[in-house]
Amino acid sequence: MVWCFQCGASYDEDAAECVECGVATFPTPPQPAEEVGGPDDEQLAYEFHEWSPDSRGRLEAALRAQELEHAWLGPTLIVCEADEEAVDKTVEGVLRAQLPKLDKSQPAVVYELGDYDEAHKADVLSELLSEGIAHEIDYAGNLEVAEADEEAVDALFDRLSSTAAQRQFGPGLPGVEPYQVLETLFFSSDRLRRNTSDTKAMEDFALAHDQVVQLSLPWGYEPDFWRAMLDAADGLREALVAGPDPVEGDAAAGQAAEALRELLRRYM
């Protein structure tokens, strides 16, 4: 007997693939999802709906070769959370094995990766693998792709840059509208630039500052502006906490409030 690793259907030994799932059959039955891991083990799910039946079969063979506990619910792979790193490497290996080789006879485009940290480089290579784009890393550590893939690779870099920009800021604050927070920062800093002893303005500013540092980058705002605004808000907070200077008095706080107000003015 042979079995389909996705649905568990059994067939005679001469059946090479499952008639329902279209994936390869194997000589032993699949593991039930509820038996993956122990009673206290967390499970992870990987979605492989976009993978071809042949690719899923290659992944199944690789997982079995490493004796990694797993199960399939259709094209969804269930594994132990403790095996996440090993499964990730296995998935990458299957993708890499199927990746077309870069044709050196065709025009190529080179991307310099020297300014990227290792985590960002890993993200780039992972995306190239996922999209099946042939590539090589040259002796200088630069990325080389076919000229025909330039548009797709440019879009890939744009996506990753946007994601990286999002990670620079807060985790998000559900239920809080960014424009309302910026409005409060603007009006409180406007009052504080004229009177750094305005208690209501200080209270409004403190609340808005606490919120803005938690916000993720809102849609429509440039990362450079958002970072400059956060720095200016931090500067005003530090000046208010420090209090008046023995010589210059409230000048530092007033200047910090003016700087924040000017930065926000074009958005009001």
Image (cartoon, rainbow, N blue to C red):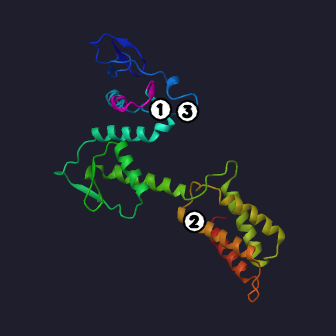
- Examine the rendered structure and indicate whether residue 12 appears above or below residue 210: above
Q: Which is closer to the viewer, label 3 or label 2?
A: 3
Q: Is residue 219 above or below residue 251?
A: above
Element class at badge 2: helix
Q: Residue furthest left?
A: 105
Taking the view exactly as shown, the residue that stands out farthest to the right is 199
Q: Residue at x 58, y 31 (%)?
A: 40
For label 1, the SS is strand
Q: Is residue 250 left or right of residue 267?
A: right
- Residue for badge 2: 227
Type of residue at label 3? Asp
Please report whichever mark, 1 or 3, sits nearer to the chain's N-terminal start.
Answer: 3
Which of disc 1 and disc 2 is earlier in sequence?
Answer: 1
Residue 29 quadrant: top left
Find the magenta span and give its range.
61-74
Mark 2, other Cα within 10 Å: few <14 / some 14–19 / many ≥20: some
Residue 175 drawn at (x, y percent): 70, 48
Residue under pointer 3: 41
Which amino acid, by three-letter code, is at mark 1?
Val
| Quarter residue 42 falls in | top right
